[in-house]
């Protein structure tokens, strides 16, 4: 399937210091953030070309708020050996976009407090307001927030694409299985180069 850039939104998920920087919280907890950092380095060129093609760019950032931590969420975080506020605490340096990622005028911004970018946010309304019925999901982590967002996009009847060279992770074993599963059940998988080529062909023919 090929989708017009004019009807596409690129959802940039959680490309923040705590997930991408060696000085961030995930690295301090012992995670390897090299793949996330590499994705952050590749994103600016892709996003520039996606904007030029007509895509809407939506920056989605995780934010941990004390008032929004449920007992279930606290228990799950503690089972993983950390506080639910230890990663991307609201207002912290760790919650800011990773180095080199700079939004442009016309981009949209959403804060989320759960794994999915659709839970507790106006993302559905934003996409409808901009006439976007195809989403490209990039960012991190392939097996957590990217996974949750893609599943919810599919359940909302949105055409959904994941360029596998623009999704990151800290656990390759979990991420690789998640990517295979998502590509079978929930979305198209492709590469960023193929996407850009498709947009050029589709929008030139429109």
Image (tube, helix red, strand yellow):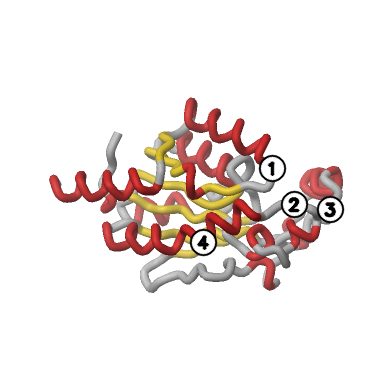
| Residue ID at (36%, 58%) | 56
| Residue density around tag 2, few if under 14, some if 14–19, many if 20 or more, within 10 Å | some
Task: Give the residue at mark 1.
Answer: 171
Mark earlier in primary sequence (1, 4): 4
Q: Give the residue number, with chain letter if any, for mark 3.
A: 82
Circles 3 and 2: CB atoms closer than 8 Å: no
User: Residue 192 appears at what percent x and percent y?
Assistant: 39, 48
Give x and y (percent) for residue 53: 27, 57
Specify few, some or many for label 3: CA neighbours under 10 Å numbering under 14, 14-19, or 20 or more.
Answer: some
Locate residue 189, reporting x and y percent: 43, 36
Left or right, residue 156 beside residue 116: left
Q: Nearer the viewer, residue 178 or 110?
A: 178
Distance, label 1 to label 2, CA atoms, is 8 Å
User: Is residue 166 shown left or right of residue 80?
Assistant: left
Identify the residue under disc 4.
41
Camera-nearest label, 3 or 2: 2
Q: Nearer the viewer, residue 182 or 110?
A: 182
């Amino acid at each position: 399937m090929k989708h017009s850039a004019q009807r596409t939104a690129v959802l940039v998920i959680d490309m923040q210091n705590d997930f991408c920087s060696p000085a961030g919280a995930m690295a301090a907890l012992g995670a390897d953030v090299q793949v996330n950092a590499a994705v952050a380095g590749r994103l600016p060129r892709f996003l520039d070309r996606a904007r030029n093609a007509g895509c809407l760019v939506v920056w989605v950032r995780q934010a941990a708020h004390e008032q929004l931590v449920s007992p279930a969420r606290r228990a799950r975080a503690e089972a993983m050996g950390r506080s639910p506020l230890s990663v991307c605490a609201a207002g912290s340096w760790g919650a800011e976009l990773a180095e080199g990622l700079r939004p442009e005028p016309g981009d949209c911004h959403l804060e989320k407090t759960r794994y999915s970018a659709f839970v507790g946010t106006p993302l559905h309304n934003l996409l409808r307001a901009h006439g976007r019925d195809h989403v490209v999901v990039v960012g991190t982590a392939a097996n957590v927030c990217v996974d949750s967002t893609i599943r919810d996009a599919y359940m909302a009847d949105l055409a959904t694409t994941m360029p596998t060279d623009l999704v990151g992770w800290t656990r390759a074993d979990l991420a690789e299985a998640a990517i295979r599963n998502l590509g079978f059940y929930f979305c198209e998988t492709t590469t960023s180069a193929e996407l850009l080529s498709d947009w050029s062909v589709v929008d030139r023919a429109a």
